[in-house]
Image: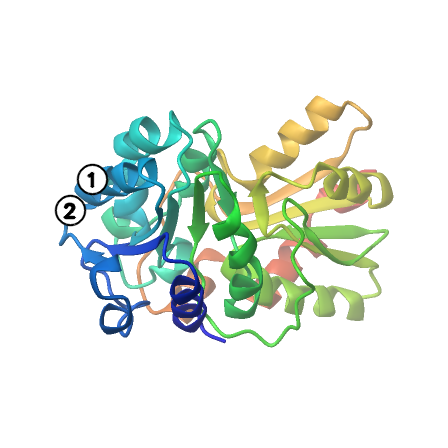
């Protein structure tokens, strides 16, 4: 099932749902003729769209809004924080082409700080599915929740059969004594392949799909830290405020143990635009590059 099919099916069953977009119909092209006046395109006006969504939510609707991730989370940030966040309204924010998926775009159109900004809003939930299968697996629970939510929309096809989604829980795919890879979103597939490369080198490698970043599965992180020599966070996001920060916060808050943590992320820079394969190669996120950075890290042998 595709994102559009799931959204259409869900909206036809629940007349509280209103589908909105700021002139970004890539995911919802066929929905207007099926939902009629429950589809609203505000034009290139992300702030207006979020404000309208908050008003609709106050009147018992469940708005599912769509825009390019950088403009949704940055241009409309004040409206998300003040109109949706403070009132904790069930507005569902769908951010399109986040992270490296905005491959052909320069810094103004790159959303690599969205996890940090969205999870900083009290009450806002943040989700980053690994692929379209994971996305449609997670969305029914996300849309049914009374909380506001931001979803990094990932409609890329994957080859992995994901487990069913339990709200707030990570998908623990495998445990590993030497390394545990923690990843979310689009980079899941490359990290899965990196796991196979490292295992051929004789390493015991775990993998966790951190599909829910807020709420986050603290127990999964603690268990990985307890059982592995090294944790590796992999993300197409700035190092500050993303998964690396989340893991550090969990370890400090729980105070159960120390752990070696390697961050594979963007440190204080935007990525160089290009075709997606070029971006991955340039930034060091191909499966082989991920595996080599881990294999050559001094942290692997520090514990």
Report if residue 285 is visible in the image: no
Label 1: few (<14), some (14–19) or many (≥20) C-alpha neighbours in 10 Å: many
Q: Which residue does the numbered mark 2 point to in the structure image?
A: 45
Count of marks placed on residues: 2
Camera-side residue: 76 or 59?
59
Q: Position of residue 276 (x, y in %)?
A: 39, 68
In the image: residue 248, left or right of residue 271: right
* Secondary structure category for the residue under label 1: helix
Q: Are marks 2 and 1 in contact (CB under 8 Å)?
A: yes
Q: Quadrant of residue 96?
A: bottom left
Camera-side residue: 9 or 159?
9
Camera-side residue: 275 or 94?
94
Q: Which residue does the numbered mark 1 point to in the structure image?
A: 47
Q: Position of residue 163 (x, y in %)?
A: 69, 64
Q: CA distance from mark 2 to mark 1?
A: 6 Å
Report if residue 225 is visible in the image: yes
Residue 134 numbered mark, or none: none
In the image: residue 51, left or right of residue 192: left
Q: Quadrant of residue 83?
A: top left
Q: Position of residue 250 (x, y in %)?
A: 68, 30
In the image: residue 203, left or right of residue 96: right
- Against 280, residue 75 (above or below) is above
Label 2: few (<14), some (14–19) or many (≥20) C-alpha neighbours in 10 Å: some
């Amino acid at each position: 099932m595709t994102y559009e099919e799931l959204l259409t099916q869900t909206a036809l069953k629940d007349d509280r749902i209103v589908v909105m977009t700021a002139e970004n119909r890539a995911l919802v092209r066929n929905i207007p003729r099926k939902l009629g006046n429950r589809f609203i395109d505000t034009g290139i006006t992300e702030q207006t769209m979020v404000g309208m969504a908050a008003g609709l939510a106050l009147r018992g609707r469940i708005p599912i809004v769509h825009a390019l991730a950088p403009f949704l989370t940055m241009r409309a940030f004040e409206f998300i924080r003040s109109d949706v966040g403070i009132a904790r309204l069930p507005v569902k924010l769908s951010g399109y082409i986040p992270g490296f998926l905005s491959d052909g775009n320069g810094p103004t159109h790159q959303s690599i700080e969205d996890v940090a900004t969205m999870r900083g809003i009290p009450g806002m939930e943040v989700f980053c599915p690994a692929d379209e299968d994971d996305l449609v697996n997670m969305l029914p629970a996300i849309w049914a929740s009374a909380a506001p939510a931001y979803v990094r929309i990932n409609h890329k096809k994957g080859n992995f059969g994901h487990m069913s989604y339990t709200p707030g829980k990570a998908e623990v795919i495998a445990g590993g004594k030497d390394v545990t890879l923690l990843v979310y979103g689009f980079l899941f597939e490359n990290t899965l392949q990196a796991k196979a490369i490292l295992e051929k080198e004789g390493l015991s490698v775990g993998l966790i799909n951190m599909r829910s970043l807020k709420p986050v599965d603290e127990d999964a992180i603690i268990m990985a830290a307890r059982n592995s020599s090294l944790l590796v966070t992999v993300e197409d996001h700035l190092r500050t405020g993303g998964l690396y920060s989340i893991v550090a916060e969990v370890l400090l808050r729980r105070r159960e143990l120390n752990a070696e943590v390697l961050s594979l992320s963007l440190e204080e820079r935007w990525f160089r635009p290009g075709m997606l394969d070029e971006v991955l190669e340039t930034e060091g996120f191909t499966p082989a590059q991920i595996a080599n950075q881990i294999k050559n890290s001094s942290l692997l042998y520090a514990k």
